[in-house]
Image (cartoon, helix red, strand yellow):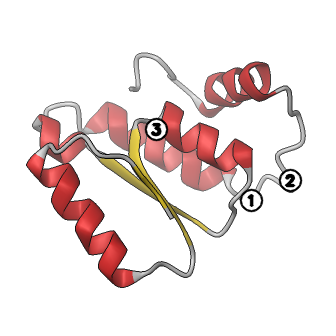
Amino acid sequence: MADRYPDADSLLNDARASTGLDDFGPGDFRAGLEVLLASFERDTDLNEAAREVIALSSSDDPTARHLARELGAQSFFRKPVDAAALLDSIEWVMQGDGRSTQN
């Protein structure tokens, strides 16, 4: 992941090109995005199961979902999260079931 998107600007530029959107709001998400991208770079020695991503967001807009998919999210949940659905998703991801869930 980190090789494909070395920084937040690259990921956001791809999202702009893919969605045609250019307003990502006030930008308060950016610090968290940079932490996530840095963790992909730092944790590249993790096994495949540990690299799986389940996205949680307070936003349910197409841009948030696109960014999550581009980062490799297997599942996307909007807060508040249904606990049972989240636990099911974690189980599917850890088993390598390949299912993708949207909640």
**Alpha carbon distance from label 2 to label 1:** 8 Å
Q: Residue at coordinates 17% horizontally, 45% vertically from top-left?
A: 97
Query: How crowded is the residue under tag 2: few (<14 C-alpha within 10 Å), some, or many (20+)?
Result: few
Residue 28: give its label.
Answer: 1
Q: Secondary structure at mark 3?
A: helix
Disc 1 element: loop
Inter-mark Cα distance, 1 to 3: 16 Å
* 31 relative position to 40: left or right: right
Q: Which residue is mark 2?
A: 25
Q: Is disc 2 in contact with disc 3, using a CB cutoff of under 8 Å?
A: no
Looking at the figure, which quarter contains the N terminus?
A: top left
Q: Disc number at residue 37?
A: 3
Q: Secondary structure at mark 2?
A: loop
**Sequence-first disc among 2 and 3:** 2
Amino acid type, residue under disc 3 in the picture: Leu
Give the amino acid at mark 1. Answer: Asp
